[in-house]
Image: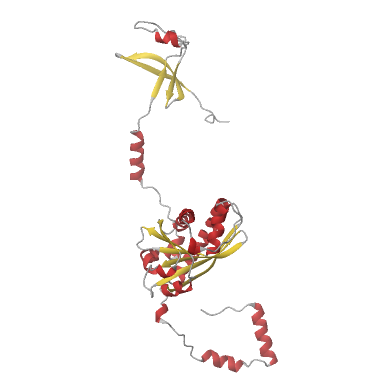
Amino acid sequence: MTDVLSQGEIDALLSALSTGEMDADELKKEETEKKVKVYDFKRALRFSKDQIRSITRIHENFARILTTQLSAQLRTFVQINVASVDQLPYDEFIRSVPKMTLLSVFEPYPLDGRFVMEINPNVGYAMLDRMLGGQGEALNKVENLTEIETKIMTKLFQRTLDTLQEAWESIEEIDPSMDDLEVNPQFLQLVSPNETVVVISLSTTIGETSGMINLCIPHVVIEPILPKLSVHLWMQTKKKEREPEEIYSLEANVKKAPLDIVVELGNSQITINEFLQLDKGDIIELDQLIEDPLLVRVGNHPKYEAQPGKVKQNAAVQITDIIEEEGDEDE
């Protein structure tokens, strides 16, 4: 891909040619010379540019959602942005991580394997301090994590994974669950050292504290869903019209749902003493005149008015009117 020059660079180039500072023949000579690009087989680029762009878009959305979630949860200023997205060997990623840091290891079910999220201790302790009611101070003492601190941070990072799930749902329905919380990267072996991973670096600010959050995703873990990261596939609408058979099946199941219908003959009020003295053959007087319509309730909601009658040897009612609920009538 050729570089695109800005208008200022074009003006500077024309000026240099006109003043003689730059020779046009030399430029042509450089252009015709064969350019050799060094390729390192240990740093195999297994993610295409198209896939890297899709991963970047996913985690830009993740950064926006996480910013909103942490702002509400920590009740302080939070700003998270995607700083870079790079692919490199796993061994190189581990060597770039500080000796003592916060490493959240999780499984992105149903994908087979594990991801790791490295949280700078300053950022992690700023979040912990806010959770415990502090001002959000960054106290870097990772090697002395207490049991309570470990428990709180584990729950906090699990909520972060819920946000990651929401960001990835347009590509794949994953259900990430926290597997472990490590502090020493030397004890963490997700994949082989030469395995290619993509590292998403998030620039994070919590109150007055700044740091990085790095998400490491091995190529071998997301390899089954890599075709879905194609821009053409990702931009396609996934909404499909419900098939007629599904509509008929849904309608049939709804028709089978039981529904309570109650006809009220009237109401009456008696004392508890009168109720206790009721006996077989006693008559209870209702507050309903015989010529008044009966109230029909459907699912405990007044729906119809009716008059009593008989069909063959069975008691029955005949619907005489529909009771309009609020909002049903046309204004």
Q: Can you say which quadrant of the picture contains the C terminus? A: top right
Residue 209, horizontal then vertical, whole percent: 60, 62
Q: Is residue 282 above or below residue 82?
A: above
Q: Is residue 326 left or right of residue 232?
A: right
Q: Is residue 255 above or below residue 298?
A: below
The mark tally for this picture is 0
Please identify the quarter of the rendering in which residue 238 is found. Answer: bottom left
Q: Is residue 18 left or right of residue 219?
A: right
Q: Is residue 181 above or below residue 248?
A: below
Please identify the quarter of the rendering in which residue 299 is found. Answer: top left
Identify the residue at the far left of this view. Answer: 313
What residue is at 37 percent from the left and 65 percent from the top? 221
Q: Nearer the viewer, residue 131 or 53?
A: 131
Residue 242, horizontal then vertical, whole percent: 38, 47
Q: Is residue 163 left or right of residue 129?
A: left
Residue 78, horizontal then vertical, whole percent: 59, 57
Q: Is residue 147 visible?
A: yes
Q: Nearer the viewer, residue 288 or 29?
A: 288
Q: Is residue 47 left or right of residue 84?
A: left
Q: Is residue 58 visible?
A: no
Q: Nearer the viewer, residue 101 or 316?
A: 101
